[in-house]
Image (tube, helix red, strand yellow):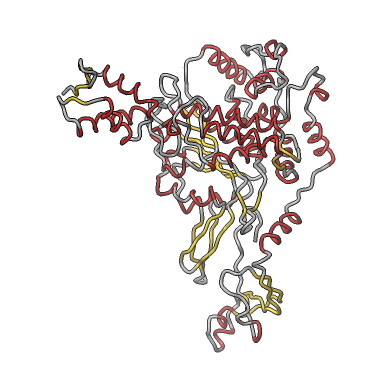
Amino acid sequence: TSHAGRTPRQMEVLLEHELVDLCRPGDVVMVAGTVQAINSAVAAGKMGKRALETSTYKLYILAHSITTMSERRDQNQNRKREQEGTAVYTQQQLQSITQLCHADHRYLGMMERRAFPFDLLVRSLCPSIIGHEMVKAGIVLCLLGGTTSTTADRGNQIRSNSHILIVGDPGMGKSQMLLAATQVASRSVFVGGNTASTTGLTVSLTKEAGGETGIEAGALVLADQGICCLDEFDKMAKSHQDGLLEAMEQQQISIAKAGVVASLPARCSVLAAANPKHGSYNMSKSVAENLNMATPILSRFDLVFILRDRADKYQDHMVATNIMNLHRREKSGSSTGRRDVSSSLQHNPQKRLALKDRLEWVAQFQKQPLPADLVRDYIAYAREHCKPKLSQEAAVVLKEYFMTLRHPTDGRNRRDSVPITTRQLEAMIRLSQARAKACLREYVLEEDALDIVELMTSSVEEIHKDAEGNMDRSRGGAGGKSKRKIKKAFVNEVYRIIGSGSECTEEDLRRIAVKVNCGLGDFAGMVEDIRDEGILMRTPSGGYRVVS
């Protein structure tokens, strides 16, 4: 069955005469027959009066015809989802969804268009948390999802669900945002990483009373066609994290245990929150070094957000005011302490406003968030009825951004560029489709792609910034290393190859830098740092001496 969040039912089928050997293992078949009942003792092979006195019966299907459906499997599943997965909305719900869909300057009475339905949805997600608009925007896009597409060669489906990882210091509201996502999602499962296991996330097998093997669905299967929130993701053991690899990429869970071979659908988005290993996030280390997490898992997240508890007088004033208003039971949408961004937006000569500026302005303009029921209905309606396609203008924007990251235009070496792959390009396509879903559009426009580029740029900059605020492009990717780790490896190779007290040339140091995978653009700065530490000394001949 392809019902969301359900495990397949098991029932024996009796084939007789010419129906035998009409299908092979692995075929998807359609069986027409009648349900029959047989004494459980007789079915087990027992005979006599004692067997007939058993009051329990077993159901089975007596097949009359069997048809192989392997060639039309995908078409039948899509048709069945369209017929059985349609939700019924009342007239009042449809009217509220229509009003929110047209939340532009005509609906709000503004002189020019400044707010989109997407901006209002971000404002209404977890309004008790002040700030973090870009993180909330990513969560809303994760809830909406992209458009499912199939490959032309074999008809394999390309996943449309996005995955987001939120890494931050304690007390930044990560768990609150995850709980808010579960409240507005039509289907959601909330799991704590410190108590989760591989079988609890995927599938477990149980022995039933009759000796048969039963399948118990885990969190990812129960969250099919929804969202699965994993809190305290860093507390989960690496052996248990490996169970997420297939579900996050192939959107299914395969099992081959105790004679049971099956594949269960797990078409869900994963929203994970994790804390750094040493309590607070260390900017001198990369994301992979800050988390106790397997590197293949990190590469499957479309967006990675880093939340740091920094001393900001303006932000701290807003947070303190909001908390006091909540405890005084006043309206949390009070504008006390908010930055006045309306004046800067009025004098903006550009037609398009940046996503970050729009979200800040909507948070100030929209004093009260939208009702949670309206947000839930709107997201469910958009996921079900809106299937946007990528337009030519949006494709050009995403392609140019991808090429800019892969091949920098400022003359840097290719090895010094951001390690972005085609997996991130597909992630941007999914996010842009989700951005178009927020406005219930049939096509992805250029403004949708520009918002996604801004969101992706914010995520990339957070990942690649070091402690001094400079861009360290070697920190990205699943196995990214920080400059501190590369410099340590470089110094060890210098001592091993050149030796203490020996002299070398700059070309010798460059060859060692290439050996430890150090970008040539960072070579000069790293040598200067080593000289400041007293490891290298400049000689009168222009070379270097290794100090013991």
Answer with the quarter of the image where residue 164 lies: top right
Depth order, front residue of 150/249: 150
Q: Residue furthest right?
A: 91
Q: Nearer the viewer, residue 486 or 509?
A: 509
Which is more toward the observer, 415 or 24? 415
Q: Residue at x 64, y 30 (%)?
A: 125
As drawn, 2 above or below 501: below
* Quadrant showing the N terminus: bottom right
Above or below, comparing residue 470 to residue 391 in the picture: above
Residue at 72%, 29% (x, y): give it. Answer: 370
Counting the numbered discs, the total is 0
The answer to whether residue 125 is seen in the rendering is: yes
Left or right: residue 237 compared with residue 347? left
| Side of 413 where 69 appears, left or right | right
Q: Is residue 33 above or below residue 437?
A: below
- For the C terminus, give its image quadrant: top left
Q: Which is nearer the eye, 417 or 8?
A: 417
Outermost residue on the bottom side: it is: 48
**Image location of residue 32, percent across then percent down:** 71, 74
Q: Quadrant of residue 323?
A: top right
Residue 96 horizontal/vertical position (percent): 80, 34
Camera sees residue 437? no
Q: Residue at x 73, y 38 (%)?
A: 378
Q: Position of residue 368 (x, y in %)?
A: 71, 23
Using the rendered view, name the quadrant where residue 439 is placed: top right
